[in-house]
Amino acid sequence: MKLYYSPGACSLSPHIVAREVGVVPELEKVDLHTHRLDDGGDYLAVNPKGYVPALRLDDGALLTEGPAIVQYLADLKPGVSLAPANGSRARYRLQEWLNYISTEIHKNYSPLFKADLPAEQRRASSEMLTRRYQWVDAALARQPFLMGEAFSVADAYLFTVTLWAQTVKLDLGGFAALTAFQDRVAQRPAVRQAMSAEGLIK
């Protein structure tokens, strides 16, 4: 399978999950500004939405949207236990976390990447993110991972978007549990493999 990605973007999350389940995807780098692929191809012809991730399956089908992709990958190897069984209450809890990360954290970072964002709006977005992280930090103070004792696809997603805090100069130093979580996840072999393949670490 082929993963369309941009280094450090939200596509890092399914990249991590793929490696957690023992899949090393073919990587196709996307320039998100020009929508060009490394070979000069037009990414919009692949995914008209224009953003990453997108996963080309072995049968040629294309799957988009990170929360859907990570669940698909987890279900390829249920024995790895990155997602609870479909139909279980725990699976809905996982989807609850994925939705929260997507709508309340991921999307609230988006304005902060704009260089011309007025200071007042930057402050408002930063404050909104800080409030959203309070709930996450409280959850992680009770358990090592979002779903409890075991790493899940939701943790890969949270780790990925939280990496952006340094880029946008969002101070998360007051969240001890979240900081410990980031350090813990960063040491996982699959995480290090994915980040190394994207050129994010040596």
Image (cartoon, helix red, strand yellow):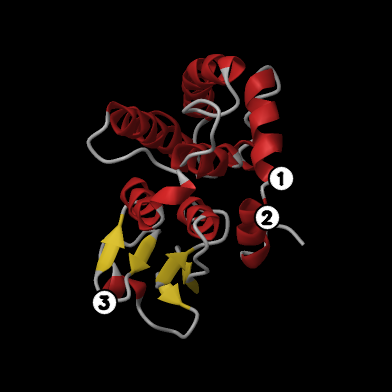
Q: Quadrant of the C terminus?
A: bottom right
Identify the element where label 2 is drawn.
helix
User: Quick one: label 1 or label 2, which is nearer the N terminus?
Assistant: 1
Whether label 1 touches label 3, CB < 8 Å: no
CA separation in Å, label 1 and label 2 = 7 Å
Number of other residues with Cα within 10 Å of mark 2, as a class: few under 14, some 14 to 19, many 20 or more: some
Can you tell which quarter of the image residue 143 is in?
top right
Q: Is residue 12 left or right of residue 175?
A: left
Identify residue for label 3: 59
Can you tell which quarter of the image residue 46 is in?
bottom left
Q: Quadrant of the N terminus?
A: bottom left
Up-down relation of residue 44 to residue 193 (above or below): below
Whether label 1 touches label 2, CB < 8 Å: yes
Identify residue for label 1: 187
Q: Amino acid at mark 2?
A: Arg
Q: Position of residue 71 (x, y in %)?
A: 35, 48
Up-down relation of residue 120 to residue 91 (above or below): above
Number of other residues with Cα within 10 Å of mark 1, as a class: few under 14, some 14 to 19, many 20 or more: few
Can you tell which quarter of the image residue 49 is in?
bottom left
Q: Amino acid at mark 1?
A: Gln
Q: Is residue 34 left or right of residue 48?
A: right
Question: Which label number is shown at residue 192?
Answer: 2
Identify the element where label 1 is drawn.
loop
Q: Nearer the viewer, residue 36 or 138?
A: 138
Q: Nearer the viewer, residue 35 or 91?
A: 91
Up-down relation of residue 44 to residue 181 (above or below): below
Q: Nearer the viewer, residue 16 or 106?
A: 16
Up-down relation of residue 164 to residue 57 (above or below): above
Question: Which label number is shown at residue 143?
Answer: none
Q: Is residue 78 left or right of residue 123?
A: left
Number of other residues with Cα within 10 Å of mark 3, as a class: few under 14, some 14 to 19, many 20 or more: few
Name the residue located 44 percent from the left edge and 84 percent from the top edge. 40
